Amino acid sequence: MTESLATRRFWPLALFRSCTAVAALLVLSQALLAGEFLSGHFEALAAHGRNGGVVALCMAIQTIAAILLWRSGSGPSWPVRTSVVQTVIAGALIPLGEQRVLTVHVPMAVGLSIGTALLTVWAWRWRA
């Protein structure tokens, strides 16, 4: 049984789309958890910290999916670079947040949120 060319090229795109959608939901939940903490629900800070690790892991998986999409010949290379940058930023946000360096943590988190939203929109609008 042989796979068609369309099937071989679709699964990396479906995987990448799934990763970007999960990443977008996780990043959105980070903003919600930060808002909950600022509203006085102090237990939300611990959840924000745990979710930050999950965001970084998801960004790393997204990078792998972007590489598979690019290497399959059905996607451009720039999402790989973007995903690597997002992974580095997500990883850097963890110690910055733990050390309460909020003057750097918050703007970087906002930038990561915007970049994640833009990459997710691109992934779901792009046709292989």
Image (cartoon, rainbow, N blue to C red):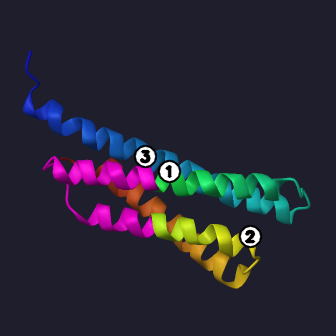
Which residue is drawn at the image coordinates 47% and 63% (left, top)?
A: 87
Q: Which mark is residue 58?
A: 1
Question: Viewer-proximal residue, 108 or 88?
Answer: 88
Q: CA distance from mark 2 to mark 1?
A: 20 Å
Q: Quadrant of residue 35?
A: bottom right
Specify the label residue 19 is tagged with.
3
Instruction: Of the two numbered discs 2 and 1 on the same chain, state the one appearing first in sequence.
Output: 1
Name the amino acid, label 1. Answer: Cys
Are the residues at dot 3 and dot 1 in contact (C-beta closer than 8 Å)? yes
Task: Say which amino acid is labelled 2.
Answer: Glu
Residue 107 image-quadrant placement: bottom right
Label 2 packing within 10 angstroms: few (<14), some (14-19), many (20+) = few
Measuring from the top left, give residue 22's x and y in whole percent. 50, 45
N-term mark: 2 or 3: 3
Q: Of all residues shown, which one is farthest toward the bottom? A: 103
Q: CA distance from mark 3 to mark 1?
A: 7 Å
Mark 1 Cα-neighbour bin, 10 Å: few <14, some 14–19, many ≥20: many
**Distance CA(mark 2)–CA(mark 3):** 26 Å
Q: Secondary structure at mark 3?
A: helix
Element marked by disc 1: helix
Residue at 30 percent of width and 62 percent of height = 80
Residue 98: which numbered mark, if any?
A: 2
In front of the other: label 3 or label 1?
1
**Region in magenta:** 60-86
Does residue 85 appear left or right of residue 56 in this picture?
left
Mark closer to the chain start, 3 or 1: 3
Location of residue 87 with respect to 127 vertically, above or below: below
Question: Is-magenta flag for residue 124?
Answer: no
